[in-house]
Amino acid sequence: MKKVKQDLKELNRDLKSLVRKTETLMKAVDMLEKSQAVKAKKIKKAATKPKTTKKMAAKASPKPRAAKKAAVMKAPAKKKTPTDTDKVINIIKRSKKGVSKKALAKKTGFDAQKISNIVFRANKTGKIKSKDRGIYIGA
């Protein structure tokens, strides 16, 4: 129930931001339409007047500016919890002389099979190297 409430609040916030964006776009379109109508009137007037006034009319007309976009509010990024592989690799990289599988099991609390699988994958991808048999160092 708590999750549903949170999702609804988030959805409501997103909808409000979309409404703000559409309003700013509508204002920008209205401004463009008005400026084009003004330009059309000035062009008609300029056609009847001599050339010197045409240049002045062209310089005097302000260019329409694009409406500023509303700042999008992003949810703060959540910190990732490190994976088991990351934990093991960090322990190995911190040690200068290398770490054995027993020491890894003791520090992490993982069973021997899990440690073996993690070490095998990390060694295969090149994140760690084996210094001696059963002792691993960071790559």
Image (cartoon, grey):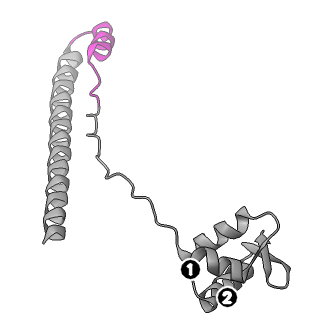
What span is colored magenta in the figure? 49-65
Q: Position of residue 111 (x, y in %)?
A: 59, 88
User: Which x, y percent locates residue 94?
Assistant: 71, 62
Amino acid type indicated by mark 2: Ser
Residue 105 versus residue 53: which sits nearer the camera?
105
41 in relation to 124, above or below: above
**Looking at the rendering, which quadrant does residue 125 occupy?**
bottom right
For the residues labelled 1 and 2, say whether their Cβ atoms are less than 8 Å apart: no
Q: Give the position of the N terminus as an image quadrant.
A: bottom left
The residue beneath circle 1 is 109
Where residue 127 sits in the image (x, y, percent)?
72, 72
Q: Is residue 38 left or right of residue 103?
A: left
Q: Nearer the viewer, residue 40 or 139?
A: 139
Q: Residue at x 44, y 59 (%)?
A: 79
Is 6 situated above or below 102? above
Q: Is residue 70 magenta?
A: no
Using a 10 Å C-alpha cutoff, classify the residue at mark 1 as few (fewer than 14 neighbours), some (14 to 19) or many (20 or more).
few
When asked about the image quadrant of residue 67, the answer is top left
Tell me the quarter of the image containing the C terminus.
bottom right
The relative height of residue 58 versus residue 74 in the rendered view (above or below) is: above
Q: Earlier in the sequence, mark 1 or mark 2?
A: 1
Residue situated in front as seen by the camera: 100 or 65: 100
User: Mark 1 is on which residue type?
Assistant: Gly
**Quarter of image, res 25:** top left
- Determine whether, in the image, residue 82 is placed left or right of residue 60: right
| 86 left or right of 16 in image | right
Residue under numbered circle 2 = 116
